[in-house]
Image (cartoon, rainbow, N blue to C red):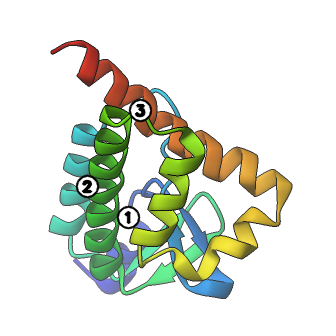
Amino acid sequence: MSNATRECSQAMPQGAYIAEFDTVFPTTPPPFYPDVALLSLQRLIDLNPKFLYFSHFGKASDAVARLRCYQEQIKLWLRIVQESLCRGESAEAILERIFTEDKAIQRTVSFLKNNPLLKKTLIENSLQGFIEFAAKLHNSH
């Protein structure tokens, strides 16, 4: 496969690429299924792309490293949400813990918090996807 074909044939991964911070922020609104997302990311990794084209905000290079980082973000967020729900923590407390522990998004936190549209559509909706998934998982046991 030529580089041109490989570049053009890539599916768009979930996530918002924030170019000014060179960072991907998970987009995981409800209903969110982490197992499906992780499988999809692995399939993209297996294609060994050079670039990614995000529906939210553009083209990013170093595709495989970004996809692997995104896999780790999903696993981290899910662990944080599950632990926090077991302790009865609020959504705000969960979000602050994510902002503290997710090194990949730390540079974007004040930018996102100070943008009302992104705060609502990106941060709150993404967190809600994890919370609803973890709550259903917890309630089924």
In primary-sequence order, the first of circles 3 and 2 is 2
Horizontally, residue 136 falls left or right of residue 122, namely left
Q: Which mark is residue 9?
A: 1
Mark 3 vs mark 2, foreground winner is: 3
Mark 2 crowd level (few <14, some 14–19, many ≥20, 10 Å Cα): some
Q: Circles 2 and 1: CB distance less than 8 Å?
A: no
On-image quarter of the C terminus: top left
Instruction: Give me the residue at 31% from left, 47% from top.
Output: 78
Horizontally, residue 21 falls left or right of residue 111, namely left
Horizontally, residue 25 falls left or right of residue 139, namely right
- Residue, disc 2: 75
Q: Nearer the viewer, residue 20 or 7?
A: 20
Callout 2: helix, strand or loop? helix
Q: Where residue 114 appears, x then y in whole percent?
A: 82, 66
On-image quarter of the N terminus: bottom left
In primary-sequence order, the first of circles 2 and 1 is 1
Callout 1: helix, strand or loop? loop
Instruction: Give me the residue at 19% from left, 48% from top.
Output: 39
Residue type at numbered disc 2? Lys
Q: Is residue 20 above or below residue 71?
A: below
- Residue, disc 3: 88
Q: Residue furthest toward the front? A: 87
Mark 2 vs mark 1, foreground winner is: 2
Image quadrant assignment for residue 11 = bottom left
Cα separation between marks 2 and 1? 27 Å
Q: Is residue 68 above or below residue 44?
A: below
Q: Where residue 113 appears, x then y in whole percent?
A: 74, 63
Mark 3 crowd level (few <14, some 14–19, many ≥20, 10 Å Cα): few
Residue type at numbered disc 1? Ser
